Image (cartoon, rainbow, N blue to C red):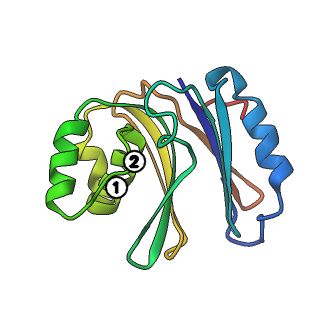
């Protein structure tokens, strides 16, 4: 089990609000005791706590990937059961892979399918993906809500996490 959290504010620069995202991450320690990470941007901050199960080196989060003129960054919790099928489609469409964790497959599947990616996933998941060029956030969870995703808007800021206490 892993945990993630984030904040998005389009009206002010939050790139120096490390203490806020760190406090949010600290509430998720029980979900990911092995490793933590952050992504700090002008209007978005992500945090992640990881329980390492697969691919310790190539599964670190937040994970970023540059494609064309954008950098896509993901925080994710879950398990994608059809990664083999996704990988085949993505390889046919020119993608390559550095590791074998489903985080990388999910991120590149989003780049390929866009918001329709959820219709191509078989699994339990919750995730957030940031598109740096469009300054666009995509949040999703599995169709049955097995993996939690909580969110609220307060003072022009979208706040989200895999636990409500985040």
Can the viewer see residue 159? no
Tag on residue 120?
Answer: none
Residue 2, percent across and down? 56, 29
As drawn, is 149 to the left or to the right of 157?
left
Picture coordinates of residue 1 (x, y %)? 53, 23
Q: Nearer the viewer, residue 130 or 71?
A: 71
Q: Is residue 67 left or right of residue 128?
A: left
In the picture of the structure, the residue carrying the numbered disc 2 is 104
Q: Quick check: marks 1 and 2 in contact, CB under 8 Å? A: yes
Q: Residue 88's x, y, as percent?
A: 15, 48
Which residue corresponds to the image point at 49% horizontal and 68% vertical from the top-left? 71
Please tell me which residue is depicted at 20% across the width and 37% down the height of the picture.
Answer: 84
Inspect this view and state whether residue 122 appears: yes
- Establish if 63 lies above or below 54: below
Q: Is residue 48 left or right of residue 154?
A: left
Q: Is residue 129 above or below residue 37?
A: below
- Residue plotted at (47% across, 43% down): 58
Nearer to the camera, 121 or 73: 73
Q: Residue furthest top?
A: 30
Instruction: Name the residue at the bottom extreme.
Output: 69
Q: Residue at x 70, y 64 (%)?
A: 9
Residue 98 lies, with reference to residue 50, above or below; the image says below
Q: Which residue is mark 1?
A: 108
Q: Quadrant of residue 24?
A: top right
Please, what secondary structure does the residue beneath circle 1 have?
helix
x, y percentage for residue 109?
Answer: 30, 53
Q: Secondary structure at mark 2?
A: helix
């Amino acid at each position: 089990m892993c945990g993630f959290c984030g904040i998005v504010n389009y009206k002010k620069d939050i790139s120096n609000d490390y203490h806020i995202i760190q406090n949010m991450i600290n509430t998720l320690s029980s979900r990911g005791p092995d490793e933590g990470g952050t992504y700090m941007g002008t209007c978005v901050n992500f945090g992640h706590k990881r329980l390492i199960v697969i691919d310790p080196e190539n599964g670190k989060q937040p994970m970023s990937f540059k494609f064309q003129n954008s950098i896509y960054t993901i925080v994710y919790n879950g398990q994608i059961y059809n990664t083999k099928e996704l990988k085949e489609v993505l390889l046919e469409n020119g993608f390559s892979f550095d590791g074998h964790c489903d985080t990388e497959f999910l991120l590149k599947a989003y780049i390929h399918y866009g918001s329709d990616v959820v219709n191509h996933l078989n699994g339990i998941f919750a995730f957030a993906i940031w598109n740096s060029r469009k300054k666009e956030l995509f949040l999703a969870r599995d169709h049955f809500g097995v993996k939690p995703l909580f969110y609220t808007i307060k003072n022009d800021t979208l706040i989200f996490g895999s636990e409500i206490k985040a």
